[in-house]
Image (cartoon, rainbow, N blue to C red):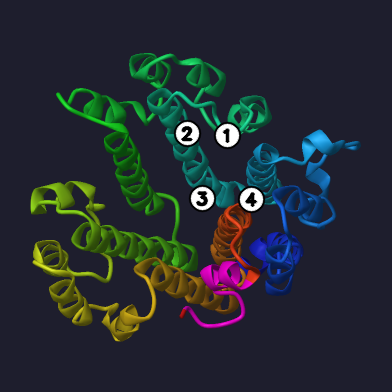
Amino acid sequence: MGSTFTYSGLNTKIHGMKNKLISDHEYVEIAGLSSVPEVIQYLQNHPGYIDLFPETTDDSFFHRGNLEQILTLSSYKNYAKIYTFSTIQQRKFLDLYFMHFETKLIKQILRKLFNHRPLPVDIKLLKPYFERFSDIPIDKAEAANDIEELLSVLSGTKYYKPLAKVNELPEKNLFDYEISLDLFKFTFYWKTKNKFLKGTDLKVITDSYGYKIDLLNLQWIYRCKKYYNMTTAQIIKMVIPINYKLKNHQVYELIESDSVKTFMKVLSDTYYGHDVHDFDNISIEKYYNRFMNRHYQNIFRKYPYSLACVNTYLYLQEQETEKLTLITEGIRYSYSPEEILKMLNIGGDYH
C-alpha cells in the first residue's frame, strides 16, 4: 500500500508522458518521409515535441543540425518533468541517472577536442539543467582548448580521476577516454544504488543495470572477436568489472575464446544462452535490444508502483532518440522505407 501511495502521482504522470512517445505506426510514417526537414516538420506537430519549437519558424530552421538539438532538449525536459513530480527518495535515483547526460556531454566535448568539430548541441540550451542537476560547469568545459584545460575544469567532479588516469598514459586516444567514462559510470551506478534503494526499487534497478552490464560486456567482447584482432589483455580493459548473471569464469572464457564460433559455444552455456541460436539471423546489438525491451515491458507491468515506471520511461525515451536518429540517417543516405524499418525492427521480431 505504501509504494502504491508513494508512486501513484508519478505513475500517472509517466503514463501520460509515455502516451506521447512515438508509436510503431508513426515510425512507419516517418520512415516514408523524403528529407530531414520533413522529419523535423513531422515532429513539430507531434504531441511529444510540439512544445520544443519556437513560436515562429522559417525554412532555415528545418535543417539537420536542429534535429539533434530538438531530440537532446526533449530528453532533458522530460527528465526535469519527472524530477519535479518525484519524492526526495525517488530523486536520489534520478540524481544518479543524470550521469547518463553528464558522460554523454563530456564525450561530445572530448570528440570536439580530438576531431576539431563543433558540439552537436548548443550549450546554452543545456546550461539550466546542468546548473540544477550537476556540478559540472559546462560552459567552461565547452570552452576548454585541450585535455589539460578540460581536466582542470572537471577537477572538482567525480569524473576527474578516471579521465586523469587515462591522461597519464604514455599513449592514449579518444577511445581510451570514452571507455574510461563508460567503465566509471556503470561501476559507480552499481556501487551507489545499494546505498539508498531497498525492496522492490532495489530489485528493479539491480535487474535492469545488471542485465545491461552483462549484455554490454557480451557486445564488446563479441565485437573484439569478430571485427578486431585484440589481445586478451586489451579486451579485459574494456570490460565492465561487474558480473550479474554471467559468472566470472564465463566472462574470461568468452574473452579467451579463439574464434566467434568458440565464443558462441561458451555463450550457449550461460544465462543468456537460450537465444544463442538466433545469432545466425540477428546481430548482437539487436539481441541486446530485444532482451532489454522485453525486460522493461515486464517490469513496467509487474511493478507499476516502483522505480520501474521511471526507469522504463527513461529507457524508452532513449530508444526513441536512437530510432529517430537512425531514421534520419537512413533518409539522408536514400534508404528505402522498408530498409529503414528493417533496421528499426518495427512491427515484428528482431530478425
Query: Which region of the structure is painted magenta?
Result: 338-350
Point out the image quarter for the N terminus: bottom right
Q: Is mark 2 on a helix, strand or loop?
A: helix
Do the residues bearing badges 1 and 4 touch, measured as CB atoms within 8 Å?
A: no
Question: Which of labels 1 and 4 is toward the front?
Answer: 1
- Mark 1 → mark 4, Cα distance in angstroms: 33 Å
**To which quarter of the image does residue 344 belong?**
bottom right
Between disc 1 and disc 3, whose residue precedes?
3
Q: Position of residue 171 (x, y in %)?
A: 17, 27
Q: Which element type, helix, strand or loop, lies under badge 1?
A: loop
- Front one among 298 and 290: 290
Q: Earlier in the sequence, mark 3 or mark 2?
A: 3
Determine the residue positioned at 24% across, 58% down.
227
Q: Looking at the rendered structure, which numbered label has been put on residue 93?
A: 3
First along the sequence among labels 4 and 2:
4
Q: What amino acid is at disc 4?
A: Thr
State which quadrant residue 54 falls in: top right
Q: In this view, does 154 lie above or below 206?
A: above
Residue 108's disc is: 2
Furthest residue in direction front, as rendered? 334
Numbered circle sitting on residue 120: 1
